[in-house]
Image (cartoon, coloured by chain):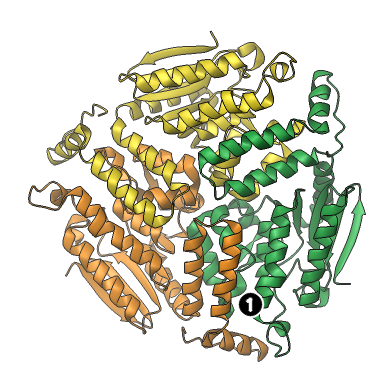
Chain colours: A yellow, B orange, C green
C-alpha cells in the first residue's frame, strides 16, 4: 500500500509509504493520496488530517523513473492528474491539514507541504525546490504558495538555485509553522494534531475557506465574505458551546460541528 | 466616553476607553470609533491618527457579554456595522494611521492593529487570533491582512490554534513594524507619530492609496497607477518644498498638502 | 557611457555608470538601461543579467537636478517612460536578472533592485524608500513588490518614514535574497551569477513567468498555468539532458534551451 492510514482521536494520519525511494510519487501513490484525502473529508470522525512520510524522507517529489519511462504518464498528465488534484483537495477540504515533515521534502514533496495549512518539520529535515536542477518549473502549487509565504526575492532564489534549505531556516523565514528538535518531533506533531482535533472544526474549516478566497480578493470583497462566513460560524453548535463555557467559566467541549 | 480624543501637534490620539473590560468592543465604542475616525479624516489640522488603549490592554476584541445578550446585536450586525466600517475607514483615510499596542490585542483588537498602516507595540504586549477558541473565524480584515503580512503558514497556524504571540515575536516575523521596551513605549510612539505628522501628509496618503490598490492589482495596472499618483504627488506644495529645501540644503517645512 | 556592459561566460553585467552622482538616473541612463536589457534579452549567449553600480553607490534613484530642471522631463514622463519600462523589462525578460547591490540603493534604485529576481547586497549597503522625504510616492514598482515581499506593516513603515535599512536587516526580513560581507561581495556575486548561468535557462525563464502570473492569479488558474508551463519545460533540451545525466549519474551540461 502506497499510503498508510490510521485514525485515532479524530486525527487521520496519512503516511506516504514508498520509503525505499524516499516516498517519491508514482501514479499509484498520487491517486491513492487523492482517494485517502477524499475519504478523510467525508469521514465525520476525522477532524484533522496529517500527511507525513514513512522512513527517513518526507517525500522526494516525482519518481523520475516513472517520468522518464516511455510507457509511463507524460509530464502534463503528472501535473494535471496527479499533483493538481492533491493541491486542490488540500486547500478545499474544510478541515485542518497538517504536514509533518519528517525528513527531506523535495520538488512536489516540498510544495505539497507548503500547500498544507500548517507545516511542522523535524529540525534535521530540509526543503528543496529541486525542479530547476532538471530544467523544470516548480509545480504542485509551488509558484502560488512560495512567493506568498516568503516573498518573491527568497522564493525566486530558492526556485532558481534549487538550493536545499534547512527546516530551521525555513522556520526563521516564515516558510513553515515550526521546526522541532528531532527527538521531540513525533510527540509534538501528534500532540499538536490532537489539540487541533479538539477545536471547533467547522469554524476552522470556514477560516480556511476565508483565507483561500482572501489570496485573490480585494479588501472590500473579503470583508463581505468574512461577514457571511462569521454568520455561518455563529450558527454552529461549537460557537454556542464556546460562549457558554466562557460564561460558565468551564472548559468547552467542542463537537466539530 | 468610550473613546478619549486628543489632538496635539497634528497628531490625533484616539484611546479605546473601556479599561474595566480590557477595552473590548461594544456597539457604542465601535460606532464612536467610526465617528472619531471620520472626524479626524475631515480635520485638516490632523496629519496622523494614533489608535491606542487606556489602561493595561490595547483591545480584547468583541465584548462577549454583548454578543450573547439576546437583546444585543447579532454577529452579522457586529461584523457588518461595527467592524467592517472601522477597517474600511482605517484603510481609506488618506492619512497615516498608527496602532500603539499598549497591551493585549485579541480578536478584532488584534486585526484592527494589523489593518493600521504601522503598528508599534510594547514588548510585553501580545497578539491573539482568539476567534477559533469559540468557533469563530478571524474577522475585522484578519483573513485579508494576516496571510499577506506573514504568509499563509504562520497565519493559518495562529488563526487555528488561537495561540498568543508576543510583540517581540510578532516583530521578528514582520507582523508589526516594531516592538519597543515597555518603559520607552509611550515616548517612542509619540515621538514617531510626531515625526510622521511633520512629513508630506498628502504624499503619504497617496502612498497608502497605492498600497491598498496594489494588494489586488497586477504589476502593469499598478505601474500605471503609480504614474497617476506620482503625477498628483508632484503637484503638491510639499513636493515643491521638499525639492527646494534639498537644493537649498536646508530642512524642509512641510504643510501636509 | 551611462551603462558599462560586459559579457563573460553567459553573464551580462550592466553597470550603472554615473558614479559622481551616485549612479542616480537621468533620462539618458534610463533609456540606455532599457536598450541594454532588450539587447541582453535578444542575445542568445546571455543566460543571466546582473545589474550593479560603478563606484560606491548602487543607485541613488532619480537625479533631482533633472527632475527640477524646467527644461527637463516631467515627473509623469519620468515614471512612464523611464522607470516603468525598466521594471516591465526586468520582469518579462525570460532570463534570471540579479541585482548586485554594491552600496546605497535609494528611491527608484531600491525598487529596481527589489523588482529583480534575486538581490545580493554588500553588508554595508542599504535600502531607502526615500520618496516620502520629498512628498512623493514609491514608484518603479515599489508599491507592488515591497508589500508582497515583506508585508504591509514593514512596507508602509519603510515607505512612510523613508528610513534607511541596512542590507543585513533587509536580508533578515526577507526583503532581499542575501547580504554578503563586503570583502566577499564581488566574488560571491559573480560566482552566483556563473552558477545560475549554467542552469537550464529556459526553465528558469518559465519559472519567472509562472511567478509573475501567480501574483495576481487565484490558485486554480495558477495550477492550470503550471501544467502548461511544465509541459513546455518538459520539451526542452535541458530537461532531457537533466534527466539523462541523473539516470547516468553524471553532471548535466545544460545549454539553456
Give the farthest residue toward the top: A1
How far across and down, in percent of the image, does residue A191 sit?
39, 25
Tally the marks.
1
Residue placed most toward the observer, A114 or B110: A114
- Residue C106 visible? The answer is no
Residue placed most toward the observer, C121 or A39: A39
Q: Which class describes the residues within 10 Å of circle 1: few (<14), some (14-19), or many (20+)?
A: some
Secondary element type, mark 1: helix
Left or right placement of residue B23 versus residue A114 in this view: left
Which residue matches tag 1? C76
- Residue A99 visible? The answer is yes
The C terminus of chain C lies in quadrant: top right
Residue placed most toward the observer, B92 or C114: B92
Q: Residue at x 58, y 13 (%)?
A: A28
How far across and down, in percent of the image, does residue C48 sit?
81, 49
Chain ID at mark 1 = C
How far across and down, in percent of the image, does residue A151 sit?
58, 49
Q: Residue at x 43, y 69 (%)?
A: B188
Please say if C28 is above or below B139: below
The N terminus of chain C lies in quadrant: bottom right
Hey, which quadrant is residue B30 in on the image?
bottom left
Hey, which quadrant is residue C122 in on the image?
bottom right
How far across and down, in percent of the image, does residue B45 sit?
36, 84
Amino acid at each position: 500500500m502506497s499510503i498508510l492510514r490510521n485514525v485515532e482521536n479524530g486525527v487521520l494520519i496519512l503516511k506516504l509509504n514508498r520509503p525505499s525511494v524516499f516516498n517519491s510519487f508514482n501514479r499509484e501513490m498520487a491517486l491513492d493520496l487523492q482517494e485517502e484525502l477524499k475519504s478523510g473529508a467525508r469521514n465525520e470522525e476525522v477532524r484533522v488530517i496529517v500527511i507525513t512520510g514513512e522512513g527517513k524522507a518526507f517525500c522526494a517529489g516525482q519518481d523520475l523513473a516513472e517520468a522518464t519511462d516511455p510507457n509511463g504518464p507524460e509530464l502534463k498528465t503528472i501535473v494535471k492528474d496527479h499533483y493538481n488534484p492533491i493541491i486542490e483537495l488540500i486547500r478545499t477540504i474544510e478541515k485542518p491539514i497538517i504536514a509533518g515533515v519528517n525528513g527531506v521534502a523535495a520538488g512536489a514533496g516540498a510544495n505539497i507541504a507548503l500547500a498544507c495549512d500548517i507545516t511542522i518539520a523535524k529540525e534535521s529535515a530540509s526543503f528543496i525546490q529541486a525542479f530547476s536542477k532538471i530544467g523544470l518549473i516548480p509545480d504542485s502549487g509551488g509558484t502560488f504558495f512560495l512567493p506568498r509565504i516568503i516573498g518573491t526575492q527568497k522564493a525566486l532564489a530558492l526556485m532558481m538555485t534549487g538550493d536545499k534549505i534547512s527546516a530551521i531556516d525555513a522556520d526563521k523565514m516564515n516558510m513553515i509553522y515550526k521546526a522541532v528538535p528531532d527527538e521531540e518531533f513525533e510527540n509534538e506533531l501528534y500532540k499538536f494534531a490532537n489539540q487541533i482535533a479538539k477545536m471547533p472544526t467547522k469554524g476552522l474549516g470556514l477560516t480556511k475557506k476565508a483565507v483561500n478566497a482572501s489570496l485573490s480578493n480585494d479588501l472590500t470583497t473579503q470583508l463581505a465574505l468574512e461577514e457571511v462566513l462569521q454568520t455561518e460560524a455563529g450558527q454552529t453548535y461549537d460557537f454556542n458551546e464556546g460562549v457558554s463555557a466562557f460564561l460558565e467559566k468551564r472548559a468547552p467541549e467542542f463537537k466539530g460541528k
